[in-house]
């Protein structure tokens, strides 16, 4: 009788304690992810200041903390783990590179920063705040196509591609994979057949309108919730980086392509 009473009491005790243990573990996981998110932001701030060696040291610190946070705990999904690993590796290469320019370093570190924010936040992610610059540059693409301005079309579409590349790892975590594949197909079509898009005004405008509509829907889907007010300073900072470097990066890539066309033997 005493043994039976003991086991009943033990089961009741476990049933009462277990929920608190689960909550405690969840809180610990959240705190770990938030800490990693903060570290990624510190690395980005160092790159903004051209302090690449310091950014590299912070990335190494991130790696150590990441191992501690994830060792034995499955706090990330497989997709999140791949996105964090890939964007972190890209940032490491950018920090260590001797020849990479400042704008490309910023692009890599911003990509990493946005991925970590996407993983850590349940509210509106930072990448969604890039709606205005992305939709604005798409408007410039359509305007250039309507005017038949070849140089402006290439410049602005390259700028769009640069922006899309920065948010791409993050949107893959938040948006249905089928929709992302459809969007990728449309973007690749316009990119691959730029000349035909410019020559066929009616079809090109329809294609560009559909692309803009698809991008708009993705942003609307993810921006239903209000952004966390504590993140606005990060949003403004990240957005400023993109806006300031966008035109230069896009134009530089376009001019590089034109040089290769003019000098096919080089």
Image (spheres, helix red, strand yellow):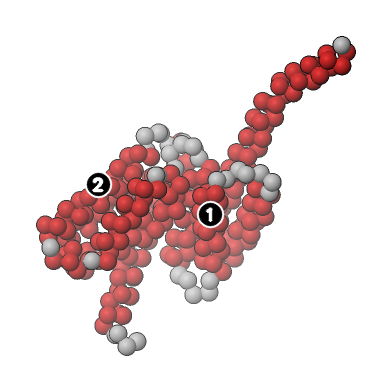
Name the residue rendered at 66%, 25% in the picture.
Answer: 19
Name the residue rendered at 33%, 70% in the picture.
Answer: 252
Marks counted in the figure total 2
Q: Which mark is residue 82?
A: 1
Relative to 108, is 212 on the left or the right? left
Label 1: how many Cα within 10 Å (few below 14, some 14–19, many 20+): few
Up/down of 24 relative to 162, above or below: above
Q: Which mark is residue 71?
A: none
> Which badge, 2 or 1, comes first in the chain's sequence?
1
Q: In the orientation shown, which residue stands out farthest toward the bottom?
A: 265
Q: Is residue 189 visible?
A: yes
Q: Kindly state the secondary structure of the residue where label 2 is placed.
A: helix
Name the residue rendered at 43%, 39% in the picture.
Answer: 124
x and y percentages locating residue 255 in the rendered image: 30, 74
Q: Kindly state the secondary structure of the residue where label 1 is placed.
A: helix
Q: Can residue 130 be seen in this view?
A: no
Of the 4 image quadrants, the one containing the C terminus is: bottom left
Name the residue rendered at 43%, 44% in the picture.
Answer: 174
Of the 4 image quadrants, the one containing the N terminus is: top right
Nearer the observer: mark 2 or 1; the answer is 1
Q: In the orientation shown, which residue stands out farthest toward the right?
A: 2
x and y percentages locating residue 58 in the rendered image: 61, 57
Whole-angstrom CA distance, mark 2 to mark 1, is 29 Å
x and y percentages locating residue 131 in the rendered image: 33, 47
Relative to 196, is 25 on the left or the right? right
Label 2: how many Cα within 10 Å (few below 14, some 14–19, many 20+): few
Residue 56 picture quarter = bottom right
Q: Which mark is residue 213?
A: 2
x and y percentages locating residue 265 in the rendered image: 32, 88
């Amino acid at each position: 009788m005493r043994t039976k009473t003991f086991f009943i009491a033990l089961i009741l005790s476990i049933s009462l304690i277990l929920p608190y243990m689960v909550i405690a573990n969840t809180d610990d996981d959240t705190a770990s992810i938030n800490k990693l998110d903060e570290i990624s932001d510190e690395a980005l701030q160092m790159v903004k200041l051209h302090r690449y060696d310091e950014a590299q040291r912070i990335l190494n610190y991130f790696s150590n903390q990441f191992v501690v946070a994830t060792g034995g705990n499955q706090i990330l999904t497989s997709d999140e783990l791949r996105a964090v690993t890939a964007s972190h590796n890209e940032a490491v290469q950018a920090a260590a590179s001797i020849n990479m320019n400042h704008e490309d370093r910023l692009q890599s570190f911003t990509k990493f920063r946005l991925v970590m924010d996407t993983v850590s936040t349940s509210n509106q992610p930072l990448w969604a705040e890039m709606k205005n610059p992305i939709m604005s540059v798409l408007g410039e693409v359509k305007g250039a196509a309507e005017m038949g301005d070849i140089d402006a079309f290439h410049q602005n579409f390259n700028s769009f591609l640069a922006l899309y590349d920065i948010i791409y790892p993050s949107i893959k975590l938040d948006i249905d994979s089928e929709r992302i594949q459809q969007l990728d197909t449309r973007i690749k079509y316009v990119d691959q057949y730029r000349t035909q898009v410019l020559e066929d005004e009616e079809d090109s405008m329809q294609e560009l309108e559909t692309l803009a509509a698809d991008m708009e829907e993705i942003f609307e889907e993810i921006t239903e919730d209000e952004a966390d007010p504590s993140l606005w300073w990060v949003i403004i900072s990240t957005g400023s980086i993109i806006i300031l470097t966008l035109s230069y990066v896009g134009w530089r890539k376009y001019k590089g392509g034109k040089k290769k066309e003019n000098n096919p033997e080089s």
